Amino acid sequence: MYVCICNGVTDHAIRDAASRGVSSFEELTMRTGCGSGCGSCADLAREILGEGRARAVREFPLPLAIAA
C-alpha cells in the first residue's frame, strides 16, 4: 500500500529500507522522500519503520560471545 502519496513511497519500500539499515525517520525521508511533502504519512511511516527494524534484528541477530 502507498504510505506517502506525495512521493509514491510504499510500505514495502519502507520495510526494505529498514532491512538495509535505515533506523530513523529522518534518514528514511532523506533516502526515499517519505514525509517530505505534506507530512501526513509520518506517523504510519515511523510505525512501519519501527516494525521493520525489529524484524531485521530478530532475523539477523548478532552472534553471542562465547566465554573463554
Image: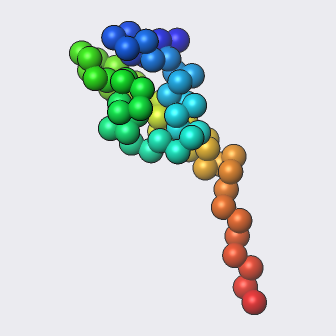
Left or right placement of residue 52 versus residue 37 in this view: right
Left or right placement of residue 61 versus residue 20 in this view: right
- Residue found at the very far left of the displayed protein: 38
Answer whether residue 30 is visible to the viewer in this image: yes
| Location of residue 59 in the rendering, given as x and y in whole percent from the top left corner | 69, 46
- Residue found at the very far bottom of the displayed protein: 68
| Location of residue 13 in the rendering, given as x and y in whole percent from the top left corner | 53, 24
At 33% from the left and 11% from the top, the residue drawn is 6
- Residue found at the very far front of the displayed protein: 31
- Name which quarter of the figure residue 3 lies in: top left
Say above or below: 24 vs 40.
Answer: below
At 52% from the left and 34% from the top, the residue drawn is 17
Query: For the C terminus, which image quadrant?
Result: bottom right
Answer whether residue 51 is visible to the viewer in this image: no
Say above or below: 1 vs 44.
Answer: above
| Location of residue 18 in the rendering, given as x and y in whole percent from the top left corner | 53, 38
- Name which quarter of the figure residue 56 lies in: top right
At 35% from the left and 33% from the top, the residue drawn is 30
Of the pair 47 and 35, the residue shown nearer to us: 35
- Name which quarter of the figure residue 42 lies in: top left
Number of numbered discs = 0
Q: How is the image coloured?
A: rainbow
At 57% from the left and 40% from the top, the residue drawn is 20
| Location of residue 50 in the rendering, given as x and y in whole percent from the top left corner | 47, 39
